[in-house]
Image: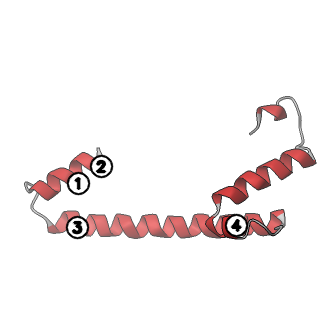
């Protein structure tokens, strides 16, 4: 949270606008249409969807990596490269 929130129980409208703008700058879909105004509720829904899609992508890549590792020789150059990347 912003250091401006220190000692305050509630965010001001300006705080919320600033946070919504920061969030909008992080979402690919929201950046593409940044000229239009989007409600905070819609932006939060898009954020949840985006995070879920990223999680699915991480899970898929993890599964693919596990399949790749299990199919290769433990002593191969490829296995060594993968181990170095994961450590």
The spot of residue 36 in percent (x, y) is: 81, 69
Q: CA distance from mark 1 to mark 3?
A: 10 Å
The spot of residue 54 in percent (x, y) is: 52, 65
Residue at position x 65%, y 70% in the image: 29
> Label 3 near label 4: C-beta < 8 Å?
no
Classify the position of the N terminus by image quarter: top right
> Label 2 near label 3: C-beta < 8 Å?
no
Say above or below: 3 vs 65.
Answer: above
Within 10 Å of disc 1 (Cα), the crowding (few <14, some 14-19, many 20+) is few
Secondary structure category for the residue under label 1 = helix
Q: In the drawing, does residue 54 fall left or right of residue 36?
A: left
Secondary structure category for the residue under label 2 = helix
> Label 1 near label 2: C-beta < 8 Å?
yes
**Quarter occupied by residue 32:** bottom right
Within 10 Å of disc 2 (Cα), the crowding (few <14, some 14-19, many 20+) is few
Pointer 3 residue:
68
Depth-wise, is mark 1 or mark 4 nearer the camera? 4
> Label 3 near label 1: C-beta < 8 Å?
yes
Pointer 4 residue:
30
Q: In the drawing, does residue 66 fall left or right of residue 23?
A: left
Give the number of callouts. 4
Pointer 2 residue:
86
Q: Which numbered disc, 2 or 4, marks the residue that appears first in the sequence?
A: 4
Residue at position x 15%, y 51% in the image: 80
Residue 82: which disc?
A: 1
Q: CA distance from mark 2 to mark 4?
A: 32 Å
The spot of residue 81 in percent (x, y) is: 19, 52
The spot of residue 11 in percent (x, y) is: 88, 43
Q: Which numbered disc, 4 or 3, marks the residue that appears first in the sequence?
A: 4
């Amino acid at each position: 949270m912003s250091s401006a929130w220190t000692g305050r129980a509630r965010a001001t409208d300006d705080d919320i606008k600033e946070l919504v703008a920061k969030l909008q700058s992080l979402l690919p879909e929201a950046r593409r249409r940044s000229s239009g105004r989007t409600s905070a509720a819609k932006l939060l829904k898009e954020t949840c969807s985006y995070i879920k899609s990223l999680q699915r992508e991480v899970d898929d890549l993890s599964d693919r990596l596990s399949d790749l590792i299990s199919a290769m020789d433990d002593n191969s150059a490829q296995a060594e490269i993968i181990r170095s990347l994961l450590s």
